[in-house]
Image (spheres, grey):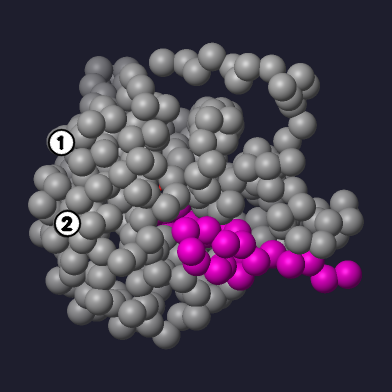
Amino acid sequence: MSVDLTTEIAGLKLKNPVTVASGTFGSKDEYAKYVKYEKLGAIVTKTVTVKPRKGNPMPRIWETPSGMLNAIGLQNKGINDFIENKIPYFVKIKTHLIVNIAGESIAEFVSLAKRLDPEKSVSALELNISCPNVKKGLAFCAKPESAYEVVKAVKEATRLPLFTKLSPETHDFLGVAEAVIRAGTDALSLINTIRGMAVDIEKMRPQIANIFGGLSGPAIRPIALRYLYEIKTHFQIPVMAMGGIRSAQDALEFLITGAHLVAVGTANFINPKATMEVLEGIEAYLKRKGFHSIGGIRGALKVKGDSAEPPVPAG
Ligand SMILES: Cc1cc2nc3c(=O)[nH]c(=O)nc-3n(C[C@H](O)[C@H](O)[C@H](O)COP(=O)(O)O)c2cc1C
């Protein structure tokens, strides 16, 4: 029995629902010896900014129980290098390219969108309005008004579908989600990392030079799932879900809760073939359960007392 893994999101038709989380899959061909890129439903790039960024001082990575802290600080070579040197590489790869962008101002977001708009190999933009590791990184997603303004401005500047990446680090998560949906985002990406810290007790210093780092990996999976569930309970927006996905079982939890796409992040550092294992495992699960398509399980979560009020959102 063959199963149909094709997935539609934000007007894009993807061959399957498996992708990678921004910043965890190199910036070009680093994973190509482990993964056939065209087997992925889409590739999401590391955040691209207007100017090159060196990132934060070292140390900026620390392993934690079931996860890691990172404070890379959006290190990248900037939009000119991306268009000159990265795009020509991705043009040859037959899958969707979702370019993650971040600006320090609305004008920067708009200028990045306008630079990428004419690029035929770019399928969509992911707006990183939720990076916890740079000054003002969380500014846009902290409040519904600022989140609305940036998404609205980018929407007006480009034909490309928009994924808006949110963080739980706001006091009004559902308010921010509602605002970016109203501003015209085509999908949400959930979740970015959550700030944490660790201490070197010998040196009596933080393990991360930046003091805080974003926590990712299996440690945040239950939190990511909860936010996905809250979004699916309140809105009809498709979601690219991420947060601690390292196996098919993990990915299936998100798909059953209602995600259209699942992105493998931190797991790529431990197992560079994780995406392929996730993909094979999803297909095997669908066959075993007798589903003909991925649509059969999306949002199939059975909640006792379905008609009851949704749980009170936290925060
Ligand atoms: C080392 C590292 C770098 C990251 N860089 C970015 C980035 O450039 N842009 C972005 O939007 N998210 C970035 N993220 C966040 C991931 O895309 C993802 O949202 C988060 O790590 C949760 O997924 P995971 O637990 O599977 O890693 C980064 C995460 C890690 C661990």
Left or right: residue 13 versus residue 170 is right
Locate the N terminus by quadrant: bottom right
Mark 1 → mark 2, Cα distance in angstroms: 19 Å
Q: Determine the residue located farthest toward the bottom in the rendered image.
A: 92
Left or right: residue 284 versus residue 105 is right
Q: Amino acid at mark 1?
A: Lys
Q: Which label was assigned to residue 110?
A: 2
Observer-side mark, 1 or 2, equals: 2
The answer to whether residue 173 is above or below residue 129 is: above
Residue 161 screen position, x and y as percent: 38, 61
Q: Earlier in the sequence, mark 1 or mark 2?
A: 2
Q: Secondary structure at mark 2?
A: helix
- Majority SS type along the magenta span: loop
Q: Is mark 1 within 8 Å of ligand 1?
A: no
Residue, x 14% and y 47% (percent of image)?
A: 106
Residue 118 screen position, x and y as percent: 25, 76
Residue 177 screen position, x and y as percent: 39, 35
- State the residue in front, 94 or 257: 257
Q: Secondary structure at mark 1?
A: loop
* Quarter of the figure with residue 306: top right
Q: Is 22 colored magenta in this rendering? A: yes
Residue, x 46% and y 80% (percent of image)?
A: 93
Locate the C terminus by quadrant: top left
Q: Amino acid at mark 2?
A: Val
- State the residue in front, 205 or 76: 76
Q: Is mark 2 within 8 Å of ligand 1?
A: no
Q: Which label was assigned to residue 135?
A: 1
Q: How many neighbours does mark 1 have within 10 angstroms: few (below 14), some (14-19), or many (20 or more)?
A: few
Q: Is 268 colored magenta in this rendering? A: no
What segment is highlighted magenta in the picture? 1-25
* Quarter of the figure with residue 78: bottom left
Q: Which label was assigned to residue 240?
A: none
